[in-house]
Image: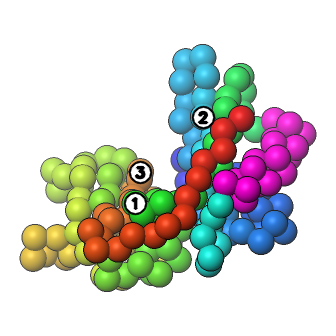
Amino acid sequence: MVGEQQRFHGMLSPSVEALGCELLGVQVSRGPRHSVLRIYIDKPEGITLDDCEKVSHQVSGILDVEDPIAGEYSLEVSSPGVDRPLFLEQHYQRFAGHRARIRLAVPMNGRRNVTGTLMSAGQGEVVVETEGEQLTLPLEQIAQARLVPDETEHRGHGGTEQL
């Protein structure tokens, strides 16, 4: 899936950035009849519904030309929200010191789910402290990662546009 995410990122990032947003990442959920392509965008002042609509319109044109997903699919453009997904090594670096919930593609040491504090990231690995121990996780083995929202922190932005 990492290769597919990189392909989508390379295809869509220039257009998203031209609209003043950062393309955080892409998720593809494939179903038997219908798939969902979800892209996460952000900018320092937060994402509005208008931003999601503009990016959705721009990205739709690219996807119509490139046709990267076979069959029917829906496009969703979303802000990262308080449980921000982490996609790239830079995201793990940026949020070092924050708590994250990580699901591995395959179990490691008998564990598939890890919740802990992000300590560092580099050279294709993420270090997480959980239950008093540090685990080094290969980035390529992380199926999904999200920040664990801090109960005291509330961010007032968000929105999702579906087509």
Q: From where the camera sits, is residue 40 visible?
A: yes
Q: Earlier in the sequence, mark 1 or mark 3?
A: 1
> Which of 38 and 11 lies nearest the eye of the viewer?
38
Which amino acid, mark 1? Asp
Which residue lies under the disc numbered 3? 143
Circle 3: element type: strand
Cα distance, mark 1 to mark 3? Answer: 16 Å
Percent coordinates x, y for residue 137 in the rendering? 32, 66
Magenta stretch?
Answer: 49-67
Percent coordinates x, y for residue 119 in the rendering? 30, 81
Give the crowd class for mark 2: few <14, some 14-19, many >=20 residues within 10 Å.
Answer: some
Where 55 falls versus 148 (above or below)? above
Q: Earlier in the sequence, mark 3 or mark 2?
A: 2
Give the crowd class for mark 1: few <14, some 14-19, many >=20 residues within 10 Å.
Answer: some
> Which residue shows up at 81% across the image and 66% down it?
19
Where 66 falls versus 7 (above or below)? above
Which amino acid, mark 3? Ala
Tell me whether the residue at label 1 lies in contact with that at label 3, contact meaning CB atoms closer than 8 angstroms.
no
Cα distance, mark 2 to mark 1? Answer: 20 Å
Which residue lies under the disc numbered 1? 83
Q: Earlier in the sequence, mark 2 or mark 1?
A: 2
> Which residue shows up at 60% across the image and 70% down it?
46
Q: Residue furthest top?
A: 33
Name which quarter of the figure residue 29 lies in: top right
Which residue lies under the disc numbered 2? 36
Q: Is residue 80 magenta?
A: no
Percent coordinates x, y for residue 14 in the rendering? 81, 65
Circle 2: element type: strand
Q: From where the camera sits, is residue 25 visible?
A: no
